[in-house]
């Protein structure tokens, strides 16, 4: 047998056994991202301005998502997120008014009406601003506020309720659609200055929308028809909501005296 075949056993008295070198400690992964990184990812800015204010700002953007979950690439406003916020605003004593910023293409009729009814039933003053568009079921939401503004370049598309998918061709189906449309009509007419005759004229107008019925109303026309109260943007809306808050406080003082 060759000597090379014998295992070499180190003698601790002569040569200490080799200890494998310990790996350098890995840097601990940060549990949370820093605020700047989060702001860039979420808001596209290195710094998001924050200020103590008595006015809560809420956005209604993209498509209003109702009972059906929309594809992830769609920009949506989920009504199950908005409704608890409205309740919290109503309960919070530090919040005295609500500013609604709208840029929506519409969406689920019942979800949109639910949001509109909640805004209209709040005890605190609210002001809406239509920016870009307040289409379809976005019209009732815009009119649900105590006072409404629209910028000159914004538009509002008014059309009858549409359904996608299978519809049973029975009289009861058409009756249901008619009742849904009637709910929207009554809400808009009761929460704006538009007359029933003018609203239905805009609703069922032919020829303006390609291969469809309805009307696209731009800024000043929306004010002229009585759908929206005034032309204006963020500055005018903030001034108005503060004015409504002061008026409410003065009225409350008058009742106490």
Image: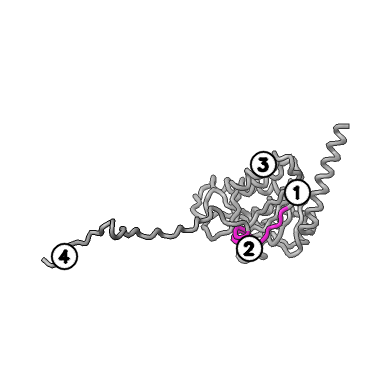
Tell me whether circle 4 and circle 1 mark residues in contact (CB < 8 Å): no
Q: Which residue in the structure is indicated by mark 3?
A: 88
Whichever of callouts 2 and 3 sits on the residue coming sooner in the sequence is: 2
Percent across and percent down for residue 239 are 81, 53
Q: Quadrant of residue 213?
A: bottom right
Q: Which residue in the structure is indicated by mark 1?
A: 53
The residues tagged by marks 3 and 4 sit, at their Cα atoms, a distance apart of 81 Å
Crowding around mark 1 (Cα neighbors within 10 Å: few <14, some 14 to 19, many 20+) is few
Query: Is residue 121 shown left or right of residue 28?
Result: right
Tell me whether circle 3 and circle 4 mark residues in contact (CB < 8 Å): no
Q: Is residue 89 above or below residue 148?
A: above
Q: Going by the picture, which residue comes out furthest to the left?
A: 1
Query: Is residue 130 shown left or right of residue 163?
Result: right
Quadrant location, the C terminus: top right
Whichever of callouts 3 and 1 sits on the residue coming sooner in the sequence is: 1
What numbered label is drawn on residue 5?
Answer: 4
Q: Nearest to the eye among marks 4 and 1: give it.
A: 4
- Residue at figure coordinates x 69%, y 53% from the top left: 139
Q: Nearest to the eye among marks 3 and 1: give it.
A: 1
The residues tagged by marks 4 and 2 sit, at their Cα atoms, a distance apart of 68 Å
In the structure shown, which secondary structural element does the residue marked by tag 2 occupy?
loop
Percent across and percent down for residue 44 are 63, 63
In the structure shown, which secondary structural element does the residue marked by tag 4 occupy?
helix
The residues tagged by marks 3 and 1 sit, at their Cα atoms, a distance apart of 16 Å
Q: Quadrant of residue 124?
A: top right
Whichever of callouts 4 and 2 sits on the residue coming sooner in the sequence is: 4
Quadrant location, the N terminus: bottom left
Residue 48 magenta: yes
State how the image is colored.
one colour
Crowding around mark 4 (Cα neighbors within 10 Å: few <14, some 14 to 19, many 20+) is few
**Residue 224 shows up from this direction:** no
């Amino acid at each position: 047998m060759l000597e090379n075949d014998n295992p070499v056993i180190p003698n601790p008295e002569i040569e200490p056994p080799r200890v494998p070198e310990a790996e350098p400690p890995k840097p601990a992964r940060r549990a949370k991202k820093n605020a700047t990184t989060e702001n860039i990812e979420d808001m596209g800015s290195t710094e998001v301005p924050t200020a103590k204010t008595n006015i809560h700002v809420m956005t209604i953007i993209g498509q209003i998502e109702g009972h059906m979950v929309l594809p992830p690439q769609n920009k949506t406003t989920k009504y199950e997120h908005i409704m608890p916020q409205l309740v919290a605003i109503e309960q919070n004593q530090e919040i005295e008014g609500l500013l609604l910023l709208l840029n929506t293409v519409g969406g689920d009729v019942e979800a949109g009406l639910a949001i509109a009814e909640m805004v209209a039933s709040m005890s605190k003053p609210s002001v809406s601003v239509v920016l870009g568009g307040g289409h379809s079921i976005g019209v009732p939401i815009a009119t649900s506020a105590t006072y409404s503004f629209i910028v000159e370049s914004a538009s509002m598309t008014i059309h009858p309720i549409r359904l996608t998918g299978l519809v049973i061709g029975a009289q009861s189906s058409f009756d249901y659609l008619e009742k849904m449309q009637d709910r929207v009509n009554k809400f808009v007419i009761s929460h704006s200055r538009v007359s029933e005759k003018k609203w239905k004229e805009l609703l069922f107008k032919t020829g303006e929308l390609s291969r469809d019925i309805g009307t696209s109303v731009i800024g000043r026309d929306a004010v002229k028809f009585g759908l929206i109260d005034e032309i204006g943007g963020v500055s005018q809306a903030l001034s108005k909501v503060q004015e409504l808050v002061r008026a409410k406080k003065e009225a409350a003082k008058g009742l106490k005296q």
